[in-house]
Amino acid sequence: MRRALSAATALLSLATTGQTALAADDAPEAPYVDDRSSADAVVRSLYSAINRHEFARAWGYFGDTKPAKDFDSFVKGYDGTDKVEVQTGAVSDEGAAGSIFYNVPVAIRATDKTGDEKVFAGCYTLRQVNAQIQAAPPFDPIHIEKGALKPSTADFEEAVPPSCGDGPPPPKKDTALEQAKKALLATYGDQCDKHLLTNEPEVFSIKYKDKDAAPGDPDKETRLFHFSCAAAAYNESSIYYMTDEVDGVRQLQLAEPETDIRYENNDSDGKLLSVTVIGFHTTGWATNSDYDPDAHTITTFNKWRGVGDASDSGTYLFRNGDFSLVQFDVDASYDGEENPQTVVDYNTAP
């Protein structure tokens, strides 16, 4: 079996053919990409640096284990190389001792100054150390641990290995779920509990018939992502995202009534006189919530104090591709008992 080559060593073989190194001022301007948000992005950033002859930046994407014995050898490995194109495949990962290791299938097409092309394929292994256990600087971002590429006879477009190692290809990436995670972090990353942000959400698939569906039309599907966000003494807050083929990923907004609550002597410890709905608003927060896949309902229960004798609760029914408020109850009595009254009842609405 032909010995696997590192990325730098693979391209060094181009230089041994006697090609002249491409001068930095002759190189076409390649896009600047410096992205450490994912393992495959780091690999693409590496080749962005190489194409721009920013070899110090390229060297910096590797961890303690470098791709050559020293920096000068690393740079020399790209003598004679005009450009390098890269493709990445489905990324797999596994956790170990506070780190996540990623395996990235890679194919590169190296073009020398005369236009001769060579294709190499293999895998990169990258490591991400849990940021929460890095207590002192410098911060160690996701980095390349090693790369093993060898010449390939396949066309560049078909050269990416289906997987790394001997196992089956990793499952197809759940794009909608990843988009929902990114949206959660972007919107609520500074409001959610850090340990809850690392948890995977509950994922539900809701199949239904559109109200305008003709006989024989296939079911539609909406997926629901339930993220736990923050936990206090007696209330836990959640965020929901939904996705379908029409609207894509979006945050679920829940309708809630605005109420005018009157007490005797204007004192909440006094006798409750009335609870009147005076308007509505929407919120992205769901308190002590749960989704029932059989009833297709989301329920909320917001305790106003720990004993739970004062609260509000909502029921939201999925129909026609979205969740609608069908019932809202308010217990405003602060009397030591749970005795809610229904202030909104749309259970019979179409």
Image (tube, rainbow, N blue to C red):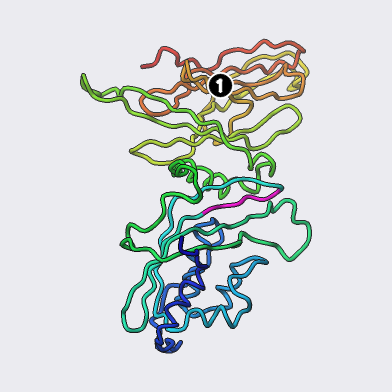
- Residue at 51% in and 34% down: 225
Q: Which residue is mark 1?
A: 299
Q: How many marks?
A: 1
Residue type at the position of mark 1: Thr
Name the image quarter holding the C terminus: top left
Other-residue count near label 1 (Cα within 10 Å), few / some / many at <14 / 14–19 / ≥20: many
Instruction: From this view, report whether residue 56 is shown above or below residue 341.
Output: below
> Residue 22 appears in which quarter of the rendering?
bottom left
Q: Position of residue 199 (x, y in %)?
A: 62, 38
> Residue 200 appears in which quarter of the rendering?
top right
Q: Is residue 55 magenta?
A: no
Q: Position of residue 277 (x, y in %)?
A: 55, 22
Residue sitting farthest toward the front? 1
Instruction: From this view, report whether residue 256 is shown above or below residue 30.
Output: above
Relative to the observer, which residue lies in front, 70 or 141?
70
Q: Position of residue 20 (x, y in %)?
A: 41, 89
Instruction: From this view, report whether residue 315 is shown above or below residue 37.
Output: above
- Residue at 49% in and 34% down: 253
- Circle 1 — which element? strand
Relative to the observer, which residue lies in front, 136 or 157?
157
The stretch in magenta equals 98-103
